Amino acid sequence: MEEEAGVLSASPERQLAGTRALHHALSSLAELPARVQKVLMLTRVEGLTQREVALAIGVSPTLINFMLKDALAHCRGSLDQSYPF
């Protein structure tokens, strides 16, 4: 990456690869049930704890843990199929 005026810039190829990976990740998230998407967003984006999310949506923290585990496994598996390294 080149640095210009304190800003990092990626090559067009890297930008395209990043954009494709982002679109693939968003597609993978869209395949999840709405409630699982919400749990993932609340914990990973909003920064709530599993306990806080459980209280907010009225389920047990254990169920939140299972939902997150399944969601992350789904996303990881989907990305692994498209981007095997």
Image: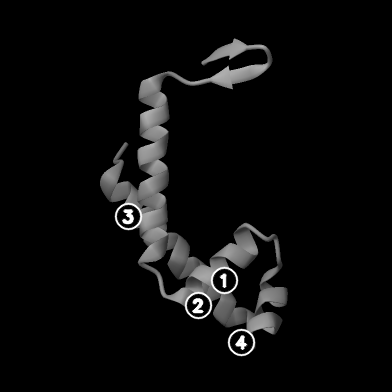
In the rendered structure, which disc, 3 or 1, sits on the residue that comes first in sequence? Answer: 1
Tell me the residue that label 1 is attached to: 39
Residue drawn at x 46%, y 61% is 72
Mark drawn on residue 59: 4
Mark drawn on residue 35: 2
CA gap, disc 4 to disc 3? Answer: 27 Å
Secondary structure category for the residue under label 2: helix
CA gap, disc 1 to disc 2? Answer: 6 Å
Query: Residue 15 location in percent, x, y?
Result: 42, 28
Secondary structure category for the residue under label 4: loop
Q: Quick check: 68 left or right of 78?
A: right
- Do the residues bearing badges 4 and 2 touch, measured as CB atoms within 8 Å? no
Tell me the residue that label 3 is attached to: 78
- Do the residues bearing badges 1 and 2 touch, measured as CB atoms within 8 Å? yes
Query: Residue 75 location in percent, x, y?
Result: 40, 57
CA gap, disc 4 to disc 2? Answer: 11 Å
In the rendered structure, which disc, 4 or 2, sits on the residue that comes first in sequence? Answer: 2
Tell me the amino acid under the disc marked 3: Ser
Instruction: Judge by depth and name the residue closer to the eye, 3 or 50.
Output: 3
In the rendered structure, which disc, 4 or 3, sits on the residue that comes first in sequence? Answer: 4
